[in-house]
Image (cartoon, rainbow, N blue to C red):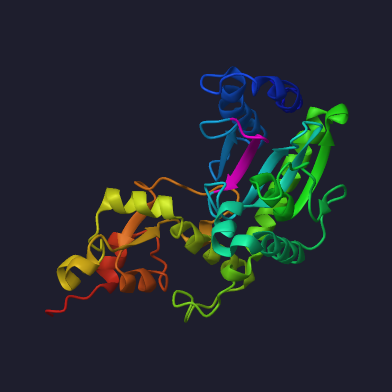
Amino acid sequence: MSLRTAISLFLEEYPEAIKKPFSGNAVADFIRNEIPIIIEKIIDKNPRYLVNGSAGQGNWAKAPWAAVYDRFITESAQDGYYIVYLVKEDFTGVYLSLNQGVTSVRKQYGSKAKLALRVRAADFVARIGKLPTGVTTGEIDLNSSDSSNLSSLYEAGSICSKYYPLTLIPTDEELASDLQAFINIYYLLMSRETQLYERIDAEEEGLQLDEEDFRKLREHKHLERNRKLASRAKKIHGYVCMACGFDFEKKYGGIGKEFIEAHHLTPISDLKGQLLKLDPRKDFAVLCSNCHRMIHRTSLVNNISGFKTKHVLDNNT
């Protein structure tokens, strides 16, 4: 099935589907399972991106959606920012939007969540700079029926968007081109995020890096800070430093239990941005804080054994 057909079904069949029981409904299953597959094909099944579709959790959502998450930034619709197809509540059209995880913002800001989302959106737009023709900034109109529901927050949280009315759904070629354009915008914003420009970082001290190397190092560190990947790597490799053997729990007792840092083994020079290894077993190691900082000062980022042999000194010698 094509994306154009899927979007049309999204808009035309959902209003009737919500009149029926949610559990086991074919339309809900289509949104959860089939639409993500269609989107994944367009982005070449790039493992950097996670695609999800939702018709609601246990009950019908007023406005279903399908999202594309950059794993560097988020793997959930609740936080970070991501690309999302958002259906208007009156089903007259759908937005392709670079939007924000509104749940975490609402928890943090409460009644001022919309203001916070607008301010953050404006900041993101300023970082992105010039946008492709046809992509607009500012709030979107989901025809929200409640000023406090999720749809109203997504309206305020939109960073940039493109609207497709039901009567004028573009060709598959245009839809695919638009999605790829948003992927490019998404990647650009990630690379320009202020929080990733921390030059005075312990891991960067003493490194002579040009702008491209700084960008690659930021991506490397951002990958290491992916909570799910780091957690999986630690469970697989344990909590003892693979370089020096330091055990935080033995040294610090209970407060050091299960404390260790995940280290991605791909060298900075090999980072390509669009496609990165994401296997916690093969592509990660665990290191204590000191070894983790030190290994980034060497050319042995992907060679724990070599780093240990060359740089980890025996205190007894």
Image: 194 above or below 279 = below
Residue at 61 percent across and 73 percent down: it is: 210
Residue at 63 percent across and 59 percent down: it is: 190
Q: Is residue 68 left or right of residue 85?
A: left
Quarter occupied by residue 167: top right
Q: Is residue 246 visible?
A: no
Image: 12 above or below 88 = above
Residue 57 percent across, percent down from the top left: 53, 35
Q: Residue furthest left?
A: 316
Between 163 and 229, the residue placed more toward the observer is: 163
Residue 120 percent across, percent down from the top left: 68, 64
Q: Is residue 299 visible?
A: yes
Between 265 and 147, the residue placed more toward the observer is: 147
Residue at 55 percent across and 31 percent down: it is: 59
Q: Which residues are magenta?
A: 60-70
The N terminus: image quadrant: top right
Residue 282: within the magenta? no
The C terminus: image quadrant: bottom left
Residue 138 percent across, percent down from the top left: 80, 56
